[in-house]
Amino acid sequence: MIPRYSRPDMVKIWEPESKFRIWFEIEAHATDALAELGVVPKEAAAAIWEKGAFEVDRIDAIEAEVKHDVIAFLTNVAEHVGEPARFMHQGMTSSDVLDTCLAVQLARASDILIADLDRLLEILKRRAYEHKLTPTIGRSHGIHAEPVTFGLKLALAYAEFDRCRTRLIAARQEIATCAISGAVGTFANIDPRVEEYVAEKLGLTPEPISTQVIPRDRHAMYFATLGVIASSVERLATEIRHLQRTEVLEAEEYFSPGQKGSSAMPHKRNPVLTENLTGLARMVRGYVTPALENVALWHERDISHSSVERYIGPDATITLDFALNRLAGVMDKLVVYPERMQKNLDKMGGLVHSQRVLLALTQAGISREDAYRLVQRNAMKVWESDGQLSLLDLLKADPQVAAALSAEELEEKFDLGYHLKNVDTIFARVFGA
């Protein structure tokens, strides 16, 4: 976790104080349940809530001696609770506390990430409608293809992040399980009803079957979902980076007063935020493979997953939270240049309309192969002239083309509006009627 790429609400979830508070609540709720079942005195359960406290520094000092974090925590709490503390952790094992706590933390982190996505979706929708009919060139392989609108580009991003939101909701549900099942998960020394009680109190669901740990396929799916979201962040960031290139310059990140782009070249306005997002996405995806490798634990448990999750839990969620917030800011203030989009559309002498001419020639009775050859031979002349020649003029002057299509018919095939006729339909599919 690096402060430069962190936001306080997400960081707080992973702070030691928050972690130990969750541990305490797990232990106290479990003791309450045991008291209701008559396993421990109700007075002891009440005393734990009344007197229970802990100090992070003291826990660390005890752990330095006993080399066990949960025992250090229980020892510190017992120093405050006194004699009734002997009824804490009855029939439980350390993983009951650790895994249930991680589930709470990841669920809370998910809520922040879902809120981040909601903000980003709202901005993308607003900007998509703003540029719903702003024509721009669509590119395949980075080369001019056919006209689209900038609103369609943003609608595409909206639909992608809406899918991300759906996946994250499902991943949150899958990760939010509670295990209070004791050593190797058999409930031999603790009633399953304790697990059900703790789960309800913490907003989790009972793990249907655990070993001594919650199965790590759940965690693998969760972090894989974060990796997919990060990839979507990078896809949109890469689009902006390309659009900001000097040769394109159809959109660019907001450049604030007083901002400087280069220590050497005063003219520079660089896409530093989206470049940063590309790097952050790489980091989040980097946590996916360790989560997948955590699935294969030995028998009923080992702790090879533990060190991994101490890294990837905080780092992946904190980094993605920062990235989603930064991307929302970029898209909110993105500067768009419709005139430059139109200039780029017109740059290659009408080549973007070649398919319409091809189809018209086939409708006029020419084979597809011959029609393709006729259009391509004229298109290549325009291409090699760097757009100085006009495809429409060349086609009108081509005897074979002119024999099949009149000048008026050819001109109609170069109508930009033709390509925008289904924008409303696409928007209705993405945003609803």
Image (cartoon, rainbow, N blue to C red):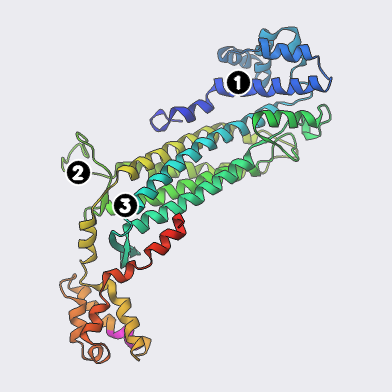
Report the residue at 21% width, 39% height from top: 262
Is any part of residue 95 visible from this angle? no
Crowd band around label 1 with a 10 angstrom C-alpha radius: few (<14), some (14–19), many (20+): some
**Disc 1 marks which residue?**
21
Which label's residue is closer to the chain start, 3 or 1?
1
Assign the C terminus to one quadrant of the image: bottom left
**Disc 2 marks which residue?**
268
Question: Is 306 or 319 nearer to us in this picture?
Answer: 319
Q: Is residue 331 above or below residue 82?
A: below
Quadrant of the rendered structure where residue 119 is?
top left
Is any part of residue 408 visible from this angle? yes
Q: Secondary structure at mark 2?
A: loop
**Disc 3 marks which residue?**
130
Crowd band around label 3 with a 10 angstrom C-alpha radius: few (<14), some (14–19), many (20+): few
Q: Main secondary structure of the magenta part?
A: helix
Discs 3, 2 touching: Cβ within 8 Å = no
Total number of numbered discs in the rendering: 3
Q: Nearer the viewer, mark 3 or mark 1?
A: 3
What's the amino acid at mark 3?
Glu
The magenta span reads 369-374
Report the residue at 36% width, 87% height from top: 363
Report the residue at 37% width, 86% height from top: 368
Q: Nearer the viewer, mark 3 or mark 2?
A: 3
What's the amino acid at mark 1?
Arg
Name the spot of residue 280 as percent of width and height, x first: 42, 41
Which label's residue is closer to the chain start, 3 or 2?
3
Q: Is residue 360 above or below residue 115?
A: below
Q: CA distance from mark 1 to mark 2?
A: 49 Å
Q: Is residue 307 above or below residue 234?
A: above
